[in-house]
Image: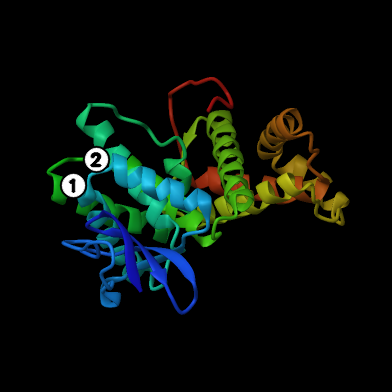
């Protein structure tokens, strides 16, 4: 493959004469001291993009014009570390989104702008491995640039990793963000209703998070559990009246925001999960607006 254009030390446009097609290639040092017409060093190629994907080409060219080439190097190294940690290859387009994100994150930090990750708590619970990978990335960035970015940034990077699983399917990504929103709000409703703080290392708490996560997906897809336990729910309403009262608050929130009424079996399972987890949590004297997020 012959080089048609060198964007920077790490990004080049090439022409494959056998396939009669142009590609954008990335890799550490791929464009270093290279000129148009030279043969590309295939051993240095890390990512390969089809050049006729206009949106990708435009974005990559824009990035090479705006971002320090060193950031491309660092991003490649980080992606390599993440893939090794997770034991799998990430979708190649994360190279674009993560390079852009890292460059902007470093710029924000140097300007003293701190952006809080509103879903950090939920990301740490649902995407544990991705969050740990994000922490590896943040540690690497902090060491490389002599900065001290907080773990909020690890949460942002974790979401980029999760998004790469969907291979550019933005609808699936947006669905995940909506699930995180419902999970965050439901956990807060429970927390403020009982005035408690969760014991995050508790197995029942993990079960609650898992149940609410799948419940949120059912809400978004407008699917319901079959109601086969109406009689049992009547008993549970009496025995666990406080937990059931909390479920009714959750139902109000879901109805008002998603126009979805929680069925009886769903209420039954939520009541049981809430009762278990709140008995192991500890009460707090902090009084806050109920359901506020």
Instruction: Decide: is 197 above or below 25.
Output: above
The residues tagged by marks 2 and 1 sit, at their Cα atoms, a distance apart of 7 Å
Query: Is residue 70 something one can see in this rendering?
Result: yes
Horizontal and vertical percent position of residue 228 = 87, 57
Give the colour scheme of this rendering. rainbow
Q: Quadrant of the N terminus?
A: bottom left
Instruction: Please give the name of the residue rendered at 45% of the width and 65% of the height, measured from the top-left corner.
Output: 22
In the picture of the structure, the residue carrying the numbered disc 2 is: 149
In this view, the residue in front, 171 or 266, is 171
Instruction: Please give the name of the residue rendered at 40% of the width and 45% of the height, measured from the top-left corner.
Output: 156
Q: Secondary structure at mark 1?
A: helix
Q: Earlier along the polypeptide chain: callout 2 or callout 1?
A: 1
Horizontal and vertical percent position of residue 54 = 52, 51
> Image check: 168 left or right of 87?
right
In this view, the residue in front, 144 or 5, is 5
Please identify the quarter of the rendering in which residue 107 is found: top left
Q: Secondary structure at mark 2?
A: loop
Q: Mark 2: give few (<14), some (14-19) or many (20+) Cα within 10 Å.
A: some
Query: Given contact means CB atoms under 8 Å apart, are the residues at marks 2 and 1 in contact?
Result: yes
Horizontal and vertical percent position of residue 137 = 28, 54
Please identify the quarter of the rendering in which residue 161 is found: bottom left
Instruction: Please give the name of the residue rendered at 16% of the width and 62% of the height, measured from the top-left corner.
Output: 33
Horizontal and vertical percent position of residue 82 = 33, 63
In the picture of the structure, the residue carrying the numbered disc 1 is: 142
Instruction: Please give the name of the residue rendered at 26% of the width and 59% of the height, measured from the top-left corner.
Output: 10
Instruction: Decide: is 289 above or below 206.
Output: above
> Image check: 140 left or right of 273?
left
> Image check: 61 left or right of 144?
right
């Amino acid at each position: 493959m012959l080089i048609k254009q060198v964007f920077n030390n790490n990004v080049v446009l090439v022409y494959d004469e056998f396939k009669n097609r142009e590609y954008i290639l990335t890799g550490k040092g791929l464009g270093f001291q290279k000129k148009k017409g030279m043969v590309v060093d295939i051993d240095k190629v890390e990512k390969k993009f089809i050049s006729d994907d206009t949106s990708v080409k435009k974005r990559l060219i824009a990035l090479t014009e705006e971002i320090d080439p060193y950031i491309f190097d660092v991003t490649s190294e980080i992606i390599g570390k993440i893939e090794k940690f997770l034991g799998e290859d990430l979708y190649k387009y994360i190279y674009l989104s993560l390079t852009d994100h890292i460059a902007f994150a470093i710029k924000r930090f140097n300007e003293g702008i701190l952006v809080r990750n509103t879903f950090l708590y939920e990301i740490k619970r649902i995407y544990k491995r991705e969050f740990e990978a994000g922490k590896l990335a943040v540690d690497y960035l902090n060491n490389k640039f002599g900065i001290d970015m907080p773990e909020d940034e690890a949460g942002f990077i974790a979401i980029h990793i999760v998004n790469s699983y969907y291979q550019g399917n933005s609808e699936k990504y947006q669905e995940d963000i909506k699930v995180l929103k419902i999970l965050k709000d439901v956990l807060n409703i429970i927390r403020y209703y009982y005035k408690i703080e969760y014991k995050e290392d508790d197995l029942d708490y993990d079960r609650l998070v898992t149940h609410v996560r799948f419940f949120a997906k059912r809400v978004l897809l407008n699917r319901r559990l079959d109601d086969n336990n109406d009689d049992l729910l009547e008993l549970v309403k009496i025995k666990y009246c406080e937990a059931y009262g909390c479920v009714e608050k959750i139902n109000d929130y879901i109805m008002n925001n998603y126009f979805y009424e929680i069925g009886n079996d769903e209420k039954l399972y939520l009541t049981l999960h809430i009762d278990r987890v709140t008995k192991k949590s500890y009460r707090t004297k902090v009084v806050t607006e109920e359901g506020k997020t």
